């Protein structure tokens, strides 16, 4: 059995731990949300109206109980609330001592929830530090958070989701993957880093007003290191979810001007910048001197309440390191927010919802879910850690990321060609493979009482060829008869931006494309999901033997491409194709060209998904291969980095097509494309493989193509009726398989032309 939380268990706090950055970005996010979604302002006003009205009804002196659903007037009521924790990660192992990394283990999450509940039940031992004037004002929120045991589809869960995403490095609203209905669950996301757009805050949350307007972002997002760390970051953010402001209000930064949070028993304050908890902060009277409130009862009686004349620097909604308490007034307001229909917060604790989410149900026990990541044995740095493309006999490191249950034993089975290699290591396996092709991995994780979790990956790692391929006459056309299966490509983050095979090739029905057009976006608007910032996807060549060209004056990587941008705004044309080589078995990669802008988008701006339809849509490209790259074993890598729309962060890219990759002392342009009117051309020329007769402006004509070899023998003869402004007739490679010179005679209408075709 896995441990679930035990309420009221005292946990030691790391008092005085330092914030690495601004504790909370909620005010800034709320300003952005109000600007983008003006309706939020009216919702905030309505929320405040409901709270004011609710406060009037509450008799502070008695524990009047109400019947029915509304519990806002019942100070003894406990709010049980289902939660879901979303771990957005890039397989960075979480260190439970230093809190670094992003793949937070289950048990650490359970411990953290337990600690949040300690604070939300006023059981935190450090309330003993609260200074005397505030002792009587410490409130008990009476909130119990429960990891859900039933997910939105009705399936059993531990209330934790895990998703690999580069957005763990640029946390913010777009990183809020896999949200569960926020009227049924409080969503809490954890990432490794926040984006600069969120002021690199440690965490932020949305008020109910914003949650009602943009429900797909409702909830809390926090740095993984602030899940616990002895800080009260999550209880603070939960305060915002229940509509609490910072104690100085929400119109400026702390430590600027006296402000108020509309809570009577938190005296006006400038608030405190995140720093140590000094006596001057604890006994700060600025803004709070002679602070009292006069209340008039419905019967006409008047009561003066003399609140403390020091500010409440120990409030969880301030930024000091000695945050200890919510006040009674804050608790009332949280209860009223939880009884409001704004963002339907009142549904969270509704008995029907608690049943549907299994919040109070017995904790289910699952078999473990095996998972792994493969990296180089040395570097783990971002952008270079993936080692799904492995070199023969060079070890790569597999790290165990199994989750979902305590694991008592592991079994790894690697199938590499005819070899089966097994290991039983619990944490990492470092393994080399000597047979080219895909390595299959089967992981068996034994749980402590529910049996084994078993998972298989047919394509865990690709092992490159043992020797380099001769480049002479080698073309990668991505056709089924070639060796395209030796050019592996990887969608590391499993998302919609990726390399894939296409049937829109330049000469034939095969090429590879990068799918950069996000068809889910109908305009640059919210919600932003799957923004591509930080994504990258690789295509690798077979190892090439270029040693014969070490001394050549020029040597090129040649290809044809067809691409477009989605937007005509220059700053939005932001895709990049990075071409790199390695002559060190992947230890290092050297860039030879970064392709961008016009060299990537020859068709300019196209608002619909780009699809090339004729050879004229393609352009040739030649990239100089430096002498250092001309070894007997050189691998090239095409790394595509999709572009980002600057305001919303959505994909600005369109589809990019790549075809007919070859290595040659000649420029690709030798095989220029026929774009002249009324012309006939044979391309590519010289060729190795098939060739095409490209005919312009011959619609309706019957065209005959006769190919003869150097002896005058006809090797190929075909007829076709032209039906477009540009047509092409294939000369199959099988007809011109012998190297040498051929003559291609083309008869179209009254025109007859003869072209020389060189086959090598
Ligand atoms: Zn805050």
Image (cartoon, helix red, strand yellow):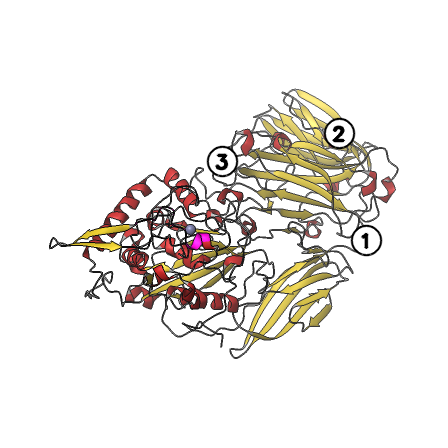
Dot 2: element: helix
Label 2: few (<14), some (14–19) or many (≥20) C-alpha neighbours in 10 Å = few
Position of residue 19 relative to residue 759, above or below, is: below
Cα distance in 3D space between marks 1 and 2 = 29 Å
Residue that carries the numbered disc 3 in the rendered image: 608
Residue at 74%, 58% (x, y): give it. Answer: 436
Q: Residue lying at the far bottom in this picture: please name it.
A: 449
Dot 1: element: loop
Mark 1 in CB contact with mark 2 (< 8 angstroms): no
Start-end of magenta stretch:
280-290
Some atom of ligand 1 lies within 8 Å of the CB belonging to the residue at label 3: no
Residue 331 visible, this angle = yes
Q: Residue lying at the far right in this picture: please name it.
A: 551
Query: x and y percent of residue 454 in the render?
Result: 57, 71
Residue that carries the numbered disc 2 in the rendered image: 670
Q: Nearer the viewer, residue 744 or 395?
A: 395
Cα distance in 3D space between marks 3 and 2 = 32 Å
């Amino acid at each position: 059995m896995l441990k679930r939380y035990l309420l009221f268990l005292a946990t030691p706090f790391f008092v005085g731990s330092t914030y690495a950055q601004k504790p909370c970005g909620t005010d800034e996010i709320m300003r952005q949300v109000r600007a983008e979604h003006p309706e939020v302002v009216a919702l905030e006003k309505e929320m405040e109206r409901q709270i004011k009205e609710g406060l009037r009804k509450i008799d502070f002196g008695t524990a009047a109980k109400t019947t029915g659903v509304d519990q806002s007037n019942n100070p003894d009521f406990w709010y049980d609330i289902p939660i879901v924790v979303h771990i957005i990660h890039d397989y960075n192992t979480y260190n439970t001592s230093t809190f670094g990394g992003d793949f937070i283990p289950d048990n650490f999450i359970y411990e953290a929830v337990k600690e949040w509940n300690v604070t939300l039940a006023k059981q935190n031992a450090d309330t003993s530090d609260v200074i005397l004037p505030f002792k009587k004002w410490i409130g008990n929120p009476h909130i119990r958070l429960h990891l859900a045991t039933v997910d939105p589809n009705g399936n059993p869960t531990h209330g934790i989701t895990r998703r690999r995403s580069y957005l763990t490095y640029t946390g913010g609203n777009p990183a809020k993957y896999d949200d569960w209905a926020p009227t049924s669950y409080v969503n809490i996301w954890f990432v490794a880093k926040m984006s600069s757009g969120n002021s690199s805050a440690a965490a932020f949350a949305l008020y109910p007003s914003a949650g009602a307007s943009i429900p797909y972002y409702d909830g809390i997002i926090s740095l993984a290191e602030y899940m616990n760390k002895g800080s009260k970051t999550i209880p603070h953010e939960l305060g915002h979810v229940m509509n609490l402001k910072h104690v100085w209000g929400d119109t400026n930064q702390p430590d600027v001007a006296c402000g108020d949070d509309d809570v009577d028993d938190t005296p006006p304050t400038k608030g405190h910048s995140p720093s140590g908890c000094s006596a001057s902060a604890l006994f700060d009277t600025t803004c709070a001197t002679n602070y009292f409130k006069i209340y008039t009862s419905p019967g006409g009686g008047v009561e003066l309440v003399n609140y403390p004349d020091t500010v409440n620097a120990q409030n969880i909604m301030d930024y000091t390191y000695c945050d200890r308490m919510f006040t009674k007034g804050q608790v009332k307001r949280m209860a009223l927010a939880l009884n409001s229909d704004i963002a339907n917060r009142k549904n969270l604790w509704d008995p029907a919802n608690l049943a549907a989410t299994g919040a109070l149900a017995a904790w289910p026990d699952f078999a473990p879910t095996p998972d792994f990541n493969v990296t180089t044995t040395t570097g783990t740095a971002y952008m270079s850690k993936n080692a799904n493309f492995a070199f023969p006999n060079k070890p790569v490191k597999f790290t165990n990321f199994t989750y979902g249950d305590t694991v008592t034993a592991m079994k790894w089975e690697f199938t590499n060609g005819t070899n089966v290699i097994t290991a039983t290591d619990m944490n990492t396996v470092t393994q080399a493979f000597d047979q080219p092709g895909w390595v299959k991995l089967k992981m068996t994780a034994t749980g402590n009482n529910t049996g084994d979790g078993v998972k298989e990956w047919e394509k865990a790692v690709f092992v490159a060829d043992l020797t380099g391929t001769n480049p002479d006459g080698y073309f990668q056309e991505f056709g089924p008869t070639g060796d395209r299966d030796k050019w592996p490509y990887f969608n590391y983050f499993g998302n919609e931006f990726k390399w894939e095979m296409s049937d829109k090739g330049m000469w034939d029905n095969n090429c590879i494309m990068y799918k950069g057009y996000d068809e889910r976006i109908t305009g640059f608007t919210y919600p932003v999901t799957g923004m591509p910032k930080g994504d990258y996807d690789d295509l690798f060549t077979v190892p090439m033997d270029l040693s014969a060209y070490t001394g050549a004056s020029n040597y090129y990587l040649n290809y044809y491409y067809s691409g477009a941008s989605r937007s005509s705004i220059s700053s939005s044309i932001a895709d990049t194709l990075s071409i790199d080589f390695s002559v060190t078995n992947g230890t290092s990669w050297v860039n030879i060209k970064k392709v961008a802008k016009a060299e990537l988008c020859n068709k300019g701006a196209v608002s619909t998904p780009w699809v090339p339809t004729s050879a004229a849509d393609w352009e040739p490209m030649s990239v100089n291969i430096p002498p250092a790259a001309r070894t007997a074993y050189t691998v090239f890598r095409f790394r595509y980095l999709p572009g980002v729309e600057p305001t919303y962060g959505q994909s600005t890219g369109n589809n990019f097509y790549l075809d007919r990759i070859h290595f040659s002392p000649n420029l690709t342009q030798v095989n220029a494309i026929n774009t002249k009117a009324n012309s006939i051309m044979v391309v590519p020329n010289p060729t190795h493989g098939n060739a095409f007769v490209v005919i312009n402006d011959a619609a309706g004509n019957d065209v005959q193509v006769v190919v003869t070899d150097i002896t005058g023998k006809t090797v190929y003869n075909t007829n076709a009726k032209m039906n477009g402004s540009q047509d092409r007739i294939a000369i199959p490679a099988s007809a011109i398989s012998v190297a040498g010179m051929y003559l291609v005679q083309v008869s179209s209408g009254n025109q007859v032309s003869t072209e020389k075709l060189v086959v090598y």
